[in-house]
């Protein structure tokens, strides 16, 4: 019989989605009366590779075929006495399951019925929330820098914020600004082809794959499948694989500052020269005369290069020429610290104001005269210095992948990803020069999938990741000699001459500088992560059961120069009036006289770090209760031990013991050769030290709770028919133990870190030149500061829940509304148990343990909450047009220790630093209806060449400004803590804020001496942020199977500046002033891409 074309809208076939790690096809085969057909034969064919998978329906007429790679599939089904029904064009996306239900008609098996139904967009198999970003969206939407992670903003509940912590382009952390449903980006998981490439230390990923090498990716907010770990969102990314036909592209993207606008605070356009170029190639492995790999063996390779020279805008607050000479006329009154005498008519001390508010030239310290040459003079306004240098960055990345269909029951793939990058960053002050950074990385992944039985599938994956980071310092290797020239003593014993540079100087109300560069100091970092996962899927009746486990080995090692160059902080306390501190004193005046408020020094660290193995297991049951109700029930177990210290370099502090310092060792000996100054540290504190073996503790010191059970539950229910789905879920998710704060080097005796605070309002005895009283480091340490680990911990965890509805409004339009919440418990924090009581006199005598400085315990006392209304409206591609819009209304709170609000255990509940109440994003794509095959000018010819093949794409969004906290620049409580709070006597908000005064400083006053202010945290907000990025493409037909695409992309099309947070200090002249934008000015990019 001839083939009949039948259009069976929705009745004949339907597709719905559920969350899994690989692709999955599920469905029901039934006859024209909707009676299930047991024993029907289902065949699934990958259109690109022609690889076939087969299954039979069970007694209920249901089938499951898993795992499947993302791609386009054809599904056919037949049974004895029935015709063949075929459904073409099934797009299977990453991390989701597609439901394809087929109706069979009575007749000969030689007859074929083709179904051309539209597929609904509803998620009928899972309660998980997330968003799939298709290949079209990845490659077509305008991306500044072509980083696919920026598209996470299209997911409801996701907010794209600046990276936290280190922001260098060579660092893996530069992509961790994605906050998803109230969980910070440091907890986001990055899965590449099913293997974990997350960098655990501070979040992010080393492997940033070219967008042209990606098939697609999904962003999952709360994966209720027990297969997934971590508490944050999840990027589930798949790379492309080869096909039976050769395909690929070559491309070039060009950026140039001549096409851009200038920064709001710059007089000229910043330098910008960027070239991103590369290509991809995929196909079958064919060796003429030797091997034909069509339908069996495939390859895919990708290369992308990125060469960037980018201008930066530094807007620094610096002292004027008059201030440098000692003239503070018209500024805060300054007093001579050497005139300090007891108050003859009352309590405290008194000082004499400098005549005419000027410091005599002979009183200016040699250290200030020497280092002032590195501080530029103002070139804008009264005391602003604007500098627009450029940094240089280059990156080369490769992806090599091979897929092999070994037999009809076994398939495998292997992928190698390599990244090589380096960066040269300038300092904010020209005299300091620039620094060089690098961060190469690689990942090797392999997987084997075996169909053990028709209803049983085994998957095994292995992954090896290695990344490193290198940075240097300004004037590296010259520091010891420069300190000697400046007259600074006391650092000789701790400086490493090979990496020594300038000290770090900070001044309240002014921009500080440091010889340290990059993320703070010269360092090396090497990080290894090896992983093995093993899963078994068993399809039994209405249950899809999945069992599995994960073994993850992680080993980070570091070197770190720390504060071996010395760090000096000036706040104005030496030139203030002891009887009237508010409105008197100036940090630069203290600098000129050479009297810091505090100073620190430490030994540089050679290799230290840790290592450990994480063990996870799970069981998941996707239970189809009925055709309208699916339950996702799972249980995960995680054992995430704290890493053991490399060469035993980890310790705790237990003041209840006679020897409270407990150092890791399985004997009574400590590895004092692990660090150059460990023996000196041991000599200083040996009467207080014992080993973990002697104390009866494990060598890791910390004992991890083994109660790592994580139940998961989700449901998808269609009580009203095929166009409405009610979904919900609840789960416990354990947070990754980031090692940035945990694996610190601040452990005695290996680390000797000392911070000394000058006594306030007394005759100074310590100067910049001789702050440590000339005592060589290691021979005398006043009070070592360190960060001990706890002896017993629980793994931090989040509880996630959501409830909502999906409604298919039109054939291609779906509306989704959800309530989403989470609660974080036992979150990582630090608490200084040796915090001094506020009061007059020497700080050290007011500490509970005067022999030590700050003893900042790693604790788990933090908590958080998040509640949100999330709305999504999505239109599937049709007639060349699609759009995706999302809106989130939310509130995010945290409770954490904060010494600046008072006491050893000063707890504060406040908005999180990433709280964004309102967040709206809208993306679209539209192929104009002109040219061959379109509605207008369909005949081709010259009209088609001119106006045919044009496409428009764009992303626009608006979000609330994130919070900031007003502070004071000086140590009013006299505790040594920075960023103390003022007293709040008004709202602090202005109806008409300006760039010179963005908030009402008069609403805040400096507290009385030796007290804490009452102003809360995160009480004010910076400017909101708007984005509008737009692109236009034109395709030219080169051959029947190849196209040349021209692209023009504009970022920040209206060229609107949105301003960064102001200077938050209320007691300095620069307080309230805005000096930077949080977005770039308008920038343009052109590209050419040849696709074949």
Image: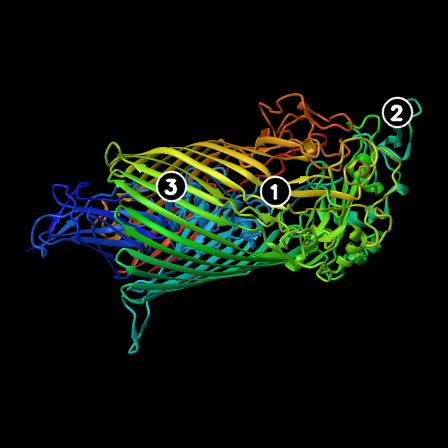
Q: Is residue 454 left or right of residue 862?
A: left
Residue 830, image x, y percentages: 64, 41
Q: Out of 983 and 575, give the one closest to the viewer.
A: 983
Q: Is residue 423 visible?
A: no
Which label is found at residue 128? 3
647 to the left or right of 735: right
For image coordinates 48% across by 49% down, the residue present is 638
- How far apart are the alpha carbons under marks 3 and 1? 50 Å
For residue 267, the mark is 1
To which residue does mark 2 refer? 347
Give the quarter of the image for residue 571: top right
Give the mark nearest the N terminus, 2 or 1.
Answer: 1
Give coordinates of residue 1004: x percent, y percent: 68, 25
Picture layout, residue 274 above or below residue 757: below
CB under 8 Å between discs 3 and 2? no
- Whether residue 730 appears in this view of the structure is yes
Q: Position of residue 94 (x, y in %)?
A: 36, 50
Q: Residues within 10 Å of mark 1 (few under 14, many from 20)?
A: few
Instruction: Give the Cα separation between the discs numbered 3 and 2.
Output: 66 Å
Q: Nearer the viewer, residue 519 or 1024?
A: 519
Give neighbour class at mark 3: few <14, some 14-19, many 20+ (Cα, 10 Å).
Answer: many
Q: Quadrant of the C terminus?
A: bottom left
Q: Position of residue 185 (x, y in %)?
A: 51, 44
């Amino acid at each position: 019989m001839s083939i009949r074309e039948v259009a069976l809208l929705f009745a004949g076939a339907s597709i719905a989605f559920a969350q899994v790690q690989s692709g999955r096809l599920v469905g029901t085969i039934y006859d024209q009366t909707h009676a299930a057909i047991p024993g029907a034969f289902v065949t699934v064919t990958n259109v690109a590779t022609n690889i076939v998978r087969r299954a039979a329906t069970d007694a209920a007429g249901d089938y499951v075929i898993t795992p499947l790679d993302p791609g386009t599939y054809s599904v056919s089904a037949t049974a004895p006495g029935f015709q063949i029904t075929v459904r073409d064009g099934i797009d299977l996306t990453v991390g989701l399951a597609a439901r394809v239900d087929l109706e069979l008609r009575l007749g000969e098996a030689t007859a074929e019925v083709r179904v051309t139904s539209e597929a609904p967009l509803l998620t009928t198999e899972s309660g998980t929330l997330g968003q799939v970003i298709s290949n079209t969206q990845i490659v077509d939407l305008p991306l500044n820098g072509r980083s696919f992670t920026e598209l996470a903003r299209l997911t409801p509940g996701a907010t794209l914020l600046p990276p936290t912590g280190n922001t260098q382009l060579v660092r893996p952390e530069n992509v961790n600004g994605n906050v998803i449903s109230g969980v910070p980006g440091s907890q986001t998981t990055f899965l590449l082809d099913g293997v974990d490439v997350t960098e655990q230390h501070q979040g992010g990923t080393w492997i940033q794959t070219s967008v042209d090498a990606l098939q697609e990716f999904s962003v999952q907010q709360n994966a209720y499948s027990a297969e997934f770990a971590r508490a944050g969102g999840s990027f589930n990314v798949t790379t492309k694989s080869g096909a039976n036909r050769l395909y690929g592209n070559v491309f070039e993207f060009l950026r140039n500052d001549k096409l851009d606008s200038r920064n709001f605070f710059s007089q000229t356009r910043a330098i910008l020269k960027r070239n991103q170029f590369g290509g991809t190639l995929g196909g079958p492995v064919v060796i003429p005369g030797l091997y034909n790999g069509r339908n069996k063996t495939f390859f895919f390779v990708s290369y992308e290069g990125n060469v960037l020279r980018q201008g930066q805008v530094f807007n620094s607050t610096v002292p004027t020429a008059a201030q440098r000479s000692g003239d503070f006329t018209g500024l805060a009154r300054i007093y001579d610290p050497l005139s300090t005498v007891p108050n003859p008519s009352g309590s405290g001390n008194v000082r004499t104001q400098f005549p005419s508010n000027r410091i005599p030239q002979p009183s200016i310290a040699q250290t200030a005269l020497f280092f002032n040459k590195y501080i530029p003079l103002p070139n804008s306004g009264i005391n602003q210095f604007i500098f627009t240098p450029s940094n240089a960055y280059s990156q080369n990345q490769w992806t090599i992948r091979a897929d092999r269909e070994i037999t009809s029951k076994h398939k495998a793939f292997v992928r190698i990803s390599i990244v090589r990058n380096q960066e040269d960053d300038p300092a904010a002050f020209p005299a300091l020069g620039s620094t060089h950074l690098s961060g190469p990385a690689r990942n090797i992944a392999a997987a084997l999938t075996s169909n053990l039985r028709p209803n049983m599938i085994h998957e095994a994956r292995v992954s090896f990741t290695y990344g490193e980071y290198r940075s240097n310092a300004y004037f590296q290797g010259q520091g010891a000699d420069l300190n000697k020239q400046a007259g600074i003593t006391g650092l000789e014993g701790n400086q490493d001459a090979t990496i020594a540079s300038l000290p770090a100087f900070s001044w309240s109300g002014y921009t500080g500088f440091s010889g340290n560069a990059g993320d703070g100091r010269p360092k090396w970092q090497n990080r290894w992560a090896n992983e093995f996962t093993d899963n078994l899927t068993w399809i039994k009746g209405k249950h899809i059961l999945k069992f599995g486990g994960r073994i993850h080995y992680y080993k980070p090692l570091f070197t770190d120069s720390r504060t071996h160059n010395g760090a000096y902080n000036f706040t104005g306390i030496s030139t203030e009036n002891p009887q009237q501190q508010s409105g008197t004193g100036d940090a630069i005046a203290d600098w000129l006289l050479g009297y810091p408020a505090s100073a620190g020094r430490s030994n540089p660290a050679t290799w230290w770090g840790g290592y450990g193995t994480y063990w996870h297991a799970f069981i998941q049951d996707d239970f189809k209760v009925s055709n309208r109700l699916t339950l996702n029930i799972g249980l995960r177990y995680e054992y995430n031990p704290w890493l053991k210290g490399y060469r035993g370099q980890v310790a705790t502090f237990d003041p209840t013991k006679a020897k409270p310092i407990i150092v890791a060792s399985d004997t009574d000996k400590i590895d004092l050769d692990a660090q150059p100054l460990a023996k000196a540290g041991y000599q200083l504190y040996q009467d207080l030290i014992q080993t973990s073996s002697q104390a009866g503790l494990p060598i890791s010191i910390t004992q991890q709770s083994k109660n790592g059970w994580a139940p998961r539950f989700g449901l998808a229910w269609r009580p009203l028919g095929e166009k409405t789905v009610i979904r919900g879920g609840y789960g416990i998710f354990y947070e990754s133990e980031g090692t940035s704060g945990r694996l610190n080097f601040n452990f005695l005796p290996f680390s000797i870190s000392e911070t000394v605070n000058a006594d306030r309002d007394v005759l100074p005895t310590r100067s910049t030149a001789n702050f440590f009283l000339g005592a060589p480091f290691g021979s005398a340490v006043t009070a070592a500061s360190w960060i001990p680990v706890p002896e017993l911990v629980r793994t931090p965890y989040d509880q996630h829940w959501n409830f909502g509805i999906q409604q298919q409004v039109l054939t291609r339009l779906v509306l989704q509304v959800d309530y989403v919440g989470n609660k974080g418990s036992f979150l990582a924090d630090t608490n200084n148990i040796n915090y001094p009581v506020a009061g007059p006199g020497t700080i050290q005598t007011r500490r509970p343990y005067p022999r030590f400085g700050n003893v900042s315990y790693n604790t788990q006392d933090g908590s958080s909450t998040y509640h949100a209304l999330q709305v999504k409206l999505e239109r599937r591609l049709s007639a060349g047009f699609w759009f995706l819009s999302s809106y989130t209304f939310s509130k995010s709170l945290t409770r954490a220790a904060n010494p600046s609000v008072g006491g050893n255990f000063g707890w504060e509940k406040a908005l999180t630093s990433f709280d964004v109440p309102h967040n709206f994003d809208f993306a679209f794509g539209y192929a104009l209806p002109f040219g061959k095959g379109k509605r207008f000018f369909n005949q081709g010819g010259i009209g088609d060449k001119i106006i045919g093949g044009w496409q428009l794409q764009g992303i626009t969004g608006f979000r609330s400004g994130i919070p900031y906290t007003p502070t004071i620049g000086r140590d009013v409580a006299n505790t040594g803590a920075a960023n103390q709070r003022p007293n709040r006597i008004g709202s602090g908000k202005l109806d008409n804020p300006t760039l010179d005064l963005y908030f009402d400083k008069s609403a805040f006053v400096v507290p009385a001496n030796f007290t804490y202010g009452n102003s809360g945290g995160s009480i004010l907000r910076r400017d909101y942020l708007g984005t509008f990025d737009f692109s236009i493409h034109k395709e030219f037909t080169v051959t029947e199977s190849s196209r040349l695409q021209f692209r023009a992309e504009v970022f920040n099309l209206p060229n609107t500046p949105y301003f960064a947070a102001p200077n938050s200090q209320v007691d300095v002249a620069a307080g309230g002033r805005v000096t930077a934008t949080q977005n770039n000015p308008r920038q343009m990019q052109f590209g050419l891409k040849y696709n074949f």
